[in-house]
Image (cartoon, rainbow, N blue to C red):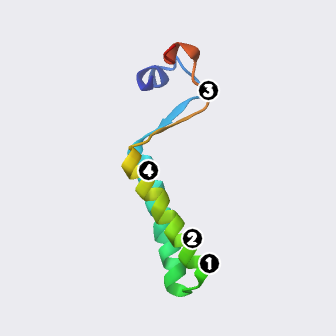
Amino acid sequence: MQEDIDAGKVSGTKIITHTQIRQELQSKVDVAQARFDANPSKKNKDKLADAQKDLSHAIRDGECLIKGCVPSEYLKK
């Protein structure tokens, strides 16, 4: 599917890779950690724990995301 997206055969669709997801979630962990370090409240601790959990789950699952509509010919029946 990525080849067809790159070739312009599929428009309005983008694949977000596992690496991109990990990088985005890691940046959210970093922001939450900085907030917690500056103000160690329960709310900030919970937000940090949630961000760490999200990153952990994404790493565990090896997920990627598809943004937009997936044409039916790419789905198994």
The residue that disc 1 covers is 43
Q: Secondary structure at mark 1?
A: helix
The residue that disc 3 covers is 69
**Mark 2 closeness class: few <14, some 14–19, many ≥20 residues within 10 Å:** some
Whether tag 2 and tag 1 are in contact, CB under 8 A, the answer is yes
Cα distance between the residues tagged 4 and 3: 22 Å
Q: Secondary structure at mark 3?
A: loop
In percent of width and height, residue 15 lies at 48, 34
**Mark 4 closeness class: few <14, some 14–19, many ≥20 residues within 10 Å:** some
Whether tag 4 and tag 3 are in contact, CB under 8 A, the answer is no
Q: What amino acid does circle 1 point to?
A: Lys
Q: Secondary structure at mark 2?
A: helix
Q: Secondary structure at mark 4?
A: helix
Q: Is residue 19 left or right of residue 8?
A: left
Q: What amino acid does circle 4 point to?
A: Ala
The residue that disc 4 covers is 58
The residue that disc 2 covers is 47
